[in-house]
Image (spheres, rainbow, N blue to C red):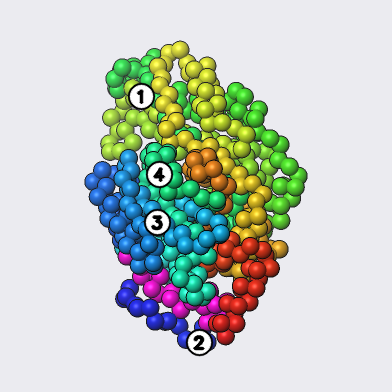
Amino acid sequence: MASVDDAPDVTRDDVPDDPVAAYLQAHRERLLNRLSEWVRIPSVAGVPERHHHLLRSANWLSGALRDIGFPVTEVWPGDDGEAVYGAWCEAPGAPTVLVYSHHDVRAVKEDNWDQTSPFDPVARDGRLYGRGTSDAKGQVAAHLWGVRSHLATTRRTGPAVNLKLVVEGEEEAGSPGLARLLDEHREKLAADLVVFSDTLLWRTDHPAACTSVRGMLGARLEVYGPYTDIHSGAVSGAAPNPAVELARLIAQLHDDHGRITLPGFYDPVPELPQERRDALARLPFDEEDWLIRSHTRSVGGEEGYTVLERLWERPALEVIAMTAGDPVGVSRASIPSMASADLSIRTVAGQSVHDVADQLRAWVDERVGDRFGHELTVSMPTSQEAYRTPEVPALDALTRAIARGFGVDVGDVGRMGNAGGGPADLLATAVDAPILFFGTGLVEDNWHDSDESVRIDVLLSGAATLAHLWAELGATTPEEAAGRAAEEATRAS
């Protein structure tokens, strides 16, 4: 993709009515070029031979912030990857907003990519393909260009809010060093509000405001049978088979109604208020559309709840990996000595990951057969609690900003949740500020999978949303925000 300068690259006939959207459309190619440049840096988390690329990625972002005008940029060492800090605090009396996201990306299986190589981004059919284009370098790019368009259309010399960013390099590894960074840099990260940008929208035509994320707890269960792998022809029918025992255990994790069987698991889960159920029901949902977008074969889960309720308001337990015997290469026809399964548990508000960890340990100890050994490892250092945004005025400001950014009526901006997790509760506790969620991802963007991509129009609309959000939050009243918008339109014309 050829590089371009600051000059607009669209004709006047292509310019939208909104000056922010017009600016972004005019600089569309430059945005994509810069994001592509960043995506080419393979900042993969948890792969030692890629570690130096995390530093390169952090330095790239630090330079991008300076290029916009951020007077303060720093690269902070992390446990497994560097974090980037930026600050532009020149708005006396305005709120201080801390933006959180990450620049590390998931490991890739390059042979599974069909559209392009993972780190050779390409724009095609309205999408930009490449690892990190959506999760989450694309979301950070929306912030970079949100600031650019905000400054350009308001003709301000700095943001209307006191703006800070912390973009970590360890999120895909479970953010092992984030708590330490938050503690060490507590004063620098002080804020009135946190904008968390590592999340999804509902649909391109219905960009609902996200108000919650689920918690996360990972665990690995190993079941032991024979002391060594043994030829099945010698001991078949008498030896303990850990693969069979593991399969038996996994089959008992859910009952016939799709409910998780850990003791006491649902006790702290509150009943879903009818108001919330009604709000989710107002979001457009078509099962066939969902199956296509999510690349899933069918709908299942806990009985008595809709798909959206299961995704955003109810806990879940998934098996994300299983290994036994000879998964690669020629089979040795042996009974394996060990079988393992990796579990991912998603919790909701009311639950505690520590309590769920105890419930899982008790469940495993009670149900593993006495002919087998076992070991359960629970990943407490990378666990995350669920979080729900309180009803704060900033949430209304975000709703208005989404409506303007995506060109929809305010009344059509619904509320949604995020089926995944993230360190939102950790951030809210450390900074002592409420969390707003806003991201530019979609379920069809293939996060963590092959051919990850981002919709370019969503990226632009997301950047516009953030530009409007800074104007909204920098205004003292909705009337002032409306007046500022009118001034912007007058200047543009």
Measured in 3D between alpha carbons, the distance from the residue under mark 2 to the one under mark 3, in whole angstroms, is: 35 Å
Dot 1 falls on a residue whose secondary structure is strand
Q: Are marks 2 and 1 in contact (CB under 8 Å)?
A: no
Q: Residue furthest top?
A: 370
Q: Are marks 1 and 4 in contact (CB under 8 Å)?
A: no
From the image, state whether disc 3 or disc 1 is nearer to you: 3
Question: From the viewer's perspective, is residue 94 above or below residue 149?
Answer: above
Choose the circle earlier in sequence order: 1 or 4.
4
Q: In the rendered image, is residue 113 in sight?
A: no
Q: Write the residue at 69% across / 68% down.
A: 479
Q: Which mark is residue 338?
A: 1
* Left or right: 479, with 215 as reference point: right
Measured in 3D between alpha carbons, the distance from the residue under mark 4 to the one under mark 2, in whole angstroms, is: 46 Å
**Where does residue 150 sit, x and y in percent of width and height?**
50, 70
**Where does residue 452 sit, x and y in percent of width and height?**
42, 57
- 29 part of magenta stretch: yes
Amino acid carrying label 3: it is Gly
Q: Which mark is residue 443?
A: none
Amino acid carrying label 2: it is Arg
Measured in 3D between alpha carbons, the distance from the residue under mark 4 to the one under mark 3, in whole angstroms, is: 12 Å
Instruction: Between residue 137 and residue 319, name the one nearer to us.
Output: 137
Dot 4 falls on a residue whose secondary structure is loop
Amino acid carrying label 1: it is Met
Dot 3 falls on a residue whose secondary structure is strand
- Residue interval drawn in magenta: 15-39
* Residue labelled with disc 4: 185
* Residue labelled with disc 2: 12
Choose the circle earlier in sequence order: 2 or 3.
2
Q: Residues within 10 Å of mark 1 (few under 14, many from 20)?
A: many
